[in-house]
Image (cartoon, coloured by chain):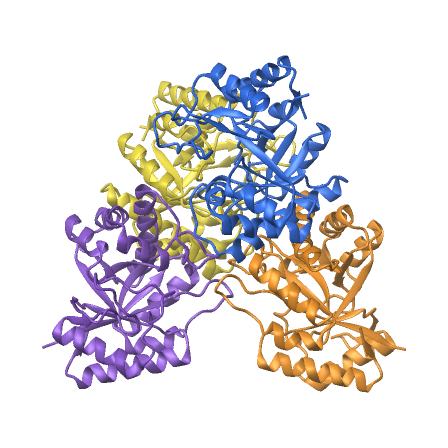
Chain colours: A orange, B blue, C purple, D yellow
Amino acid sequence: MYTIDMNCDLGESFGRFTIGRDEEVIPYITSANVACGYHASDPMVMGKTVQIAKKNGVHVGAHIGFPDLMGFGRRNMVISPEEAKTYTMYQMGALMGFLAAEHMTLSHVKPHGAFYNMAAKDYQMSLAICEGIKAIDSKVALMGLAGSEMIRAAKAVGIPVIQEVFADRAYEEDGTLVARSKPGAMIEDENEAIQRVIRMVKDRKVNAITGKDVDIQPDSVCVHGDGKAALLFVKKIREALEREGILIK
Amino acid sequence: MYTIDMNCDLGESFGRFTIGRDEEVIPYITSANVACGYHASDPMVMGKTVQIAKKNGVHVGAHIGFPDLMGFGRRNMVISPEEAKTYTMYQMGALMGFLAAEHMTLSHVKPHGAFYNMAAKDYQMSLAICEGIKAIDSKVALMGLAGSEMIRAAKAVGIPVIQEVFADRAYEEDGTLVARSKPGAMIEDENEAIQRVIRMVKDRKVNAITGKDVDIQPDSVCVHGDGKAALLFVKKIREALEREGILIK
Amino acid sequence: MYTIDMNCDLGESFGRFTIGRDEEVIPYITSANVACGYHASDPMVMGKTVQIAKKNGVHVGAHIGFPDLMGFGRRNMVISPEEAKTYTMYQMGALMGFLAAEHMTLSHVKPHGAFYNMAAKDYQMSLAICEGIKAIDSKVALMGLAGSEMIRAAKAVGIPVIQEVFADRAYEEDGTLVARSKPGAMIEDENEAIQRVIRMVKDRKVNAITGKDVDIQPDSVCVHGDGKAALLFVKKIREALEREGILIK
Amino acid sequence: MYTIDMNCDLGESFGRFTIGRDEEVIPYITSANVACGYHASDPMVMGKTVQIAKKNGVHVGAHIGFPDLMGFGRRNMVISPEEAKTYTMYQMGALMGFLAAEHMTLSHVKPHGAFYNMAAKDYQMSLAICEGIKAIDSKVALMGLAGSEMIRAAKAVGIPVIQEVFADRAYEEDGTLVARSKPGAMIEDENEAIQRVIRMVKDRKVNAITGKDVDIQPDSVCVHGDGKAALLFVKKIREALEREGILIK
């Protein structure tokens, strides 16, 4: 039996600033990555998002970001390992408070934006994140780019891993994502994107941008809920995966 | 046997900005109120402060503040009960992460500055704070102004209370603190301040600014560690209390 | 000849967080109040908004707010007169830089949200704001609630005033706005709202919620551009005013 | 006649967080770089610092930083040229408001910390900063590392330059500073540091860490005022330079 998790970034609104269609996308996913007040979100938003996740029976992870609200955590910042560790702990703990209030537990931690991209290539930063997770709760998984330094660090530290794959992104031969600035980085055709995910799940292979097949371990596929087109795609990919007999869980 | 707790606000530094002589004052106190990143502190500071508290065998509470770093949380802000509740939960959860990493538990929550002063007089705000605490852990105490709305709310919600008294502040007949802007608000004479605390502990009475004695319930006395004079006073009051056979715990 | 200015709050987006339909509403207004990074906006947004204002030949004012991004500057904060003055100067200066780059000058300063509401009733706070404006440029006007303490302070300090009126808000007999929490605070009927503005401009009178007519001095009417309905209303009120022979300038 | 400017970073306090001994160091310097609220400072601090600078007859520059208060602007952030330009304009404009209130003009702009270090090596970032300066006022100088990309960009854009040298830092052969992490990066011996500056001023040469002499153009020397030792060194270097017949201006 093939299975895959579908994860989506939620709870990215801040004060009067609204982002995302959280309530519309959540029925189609199995894991929610909730922003924790650094790159997005605030306590009001976190409380509500956790409640929505509970109502929909969805796993909740901490979507930890750089302290860069103005840049939405998408700008590389050179922080020390000790900063990476404590920023992880702070955001993770803050979300765990809201989860405790709903008698839920934290499923995973997923770095956001530039924190994710930097950690994927930086073993020391990934180690610091994983040590922060383990210091609080060694049963909480790290969700990170399949095959990246994040996964390697989580295994070294001894916490569970959730390897994440992308439907709409091209891969390099080494399993990293093709930079968005390069031609061909995005898989524009929806059907092709879906076929790629099905192949990842069933064959554990993805065709890199060079044409060569590379191995991949897909535990969870990332989807988006921040627009009408994104929402339609989530429904479409979910239906396609189920049609193939893949269990979404 | 008379007993009293001595509490002090710690972990108020932020980034390169340093406040307080935490390591010098901590040997003399029994409870540390650690700032949680809203009015002061950051994850690096929180992590270190929790470690110092552990080394010194001191109880740790969350010193929760308004989201006003520029004003150090000392400016009244009109926030909704839902905001008061979720801001409490966010800051409390964040600190609990660092405590979990040291195998410690959160002892109490103490609102800071304007949050404290507003809640002392505002039952609805106090209720919201206490509901936030209870939602996460009903064994965590609220530390608040002795005899204030905070204490009344905590009892109504059903969480433990720690009634706080001040050595260096004059009291009104209703048990509230005399506003700093009024003459006589501060007890300038150190010996008088110490005698007042001893009387509070032994007789459960304090002489109000009007001259009338009022009842008071002193569970913890607030001391400061942000200057040389403050430090000397902490040692002095501790010695005086112990000389009177009062157990500091 | 009757004239009135139409003002709208613009440039309220922040980083990836988008608010308002600035480009759609700007052709219908004559003055833009641009947020300056405290309650909303950032340097990228400010630069673009000033350029849009220039292209549309619209006056630009500084929409100064409390340092409360999380609350969008809508929460009362108790700040000192010196803080009110320097916060005014900081935000005003920041916007003037972007205006200088487009060879434009600052037309006015309008406090935002809770800063506006508090100043309307607080002469000392209003004085501090006006002193901040005058310290930088005594030709810059204060835009404030018609007949309020803001207007009185601006006259005392000796800077120009722009008295602002609201189409969709009920007035108390003393010329203040009926609090949003009270029934009847909002004028729901669009035609009634428009008729009220026409009467304010032509007769300098508005019918208070008590039924009594009160004098009013309408230099500018506030409109909104943050939704489809708001946009339609802007067009409608502009057309109605012009049909009445009122010059929008 | 040899001349040199002595510059120091001032106005770095924030709210209740105090940094630096501004009033003690300012009598010994000729240019103050005032933080503008991004990496440090707030409007109250800026207003006071400008007044102190005026009283001491010191030139005022905008010390512009990354929006990273928690990191004191010392962490590299990957921002776009448009962000670099508008962040420059925002901070510069904000300070110009306070200067206008004292009938002073802005002398220069100096990037701070990581912004300085990145711009020194990144011509595109430097161009963006200089274009921001020129957009507001082409008479305002860029103060930057002598011989760096900042100086090259300022010349290309057509704004004045102030080439800055360091007494206590070792130089590489290409005129860049030796990274603090490398051995020998700091000139520990005070007399050696002073002799190096005298030689830079008189001979326009500095001995690189490799032993080779390199050309240098010293318009201003950076000093610090954030500690007792720093203050003593400022007095000492000023006296030594004057004894050599070098005019501090």
- Pinpoint residue A210: horizontal percent, then vertical percent: 76, 75
Give the percent coordinates (x, y) of residue C129: 27, 50
Q: Relative to residue C34, is residue D239 depicted above or below?
A: above
Visible in this render: residue D119? no
* C63 in relation to B206, above or below: below
Q: Residue at the location (30% across, 65% down)?
A: C178
Q: Residue placed at 61% from the left, 52% from the top?
A: B132
Query: Where does the image place residue C138, in percent across and percent down from the top left?
Result: 18, 51
Of A10 and A205, which appears nearest the observer? Answer: A10
Residue D34 percent coordinates (x, y): 39, 40
Left or right: D85 in relation to C233: right
Kindly indicate the quadrant of the structure image that contains residue B155.
top right
Answer with the quarter of the image where residue A1 lies.
Answer: bottom right
Location of the C terminus of chain A by quadrant is bottom right
Residue A204 versus residue D178: which sits nearer the camera? A204
Does any portion of residue D185 appear in the rendered image?
yes
Does D29 sit above or below residue A224?
A: above
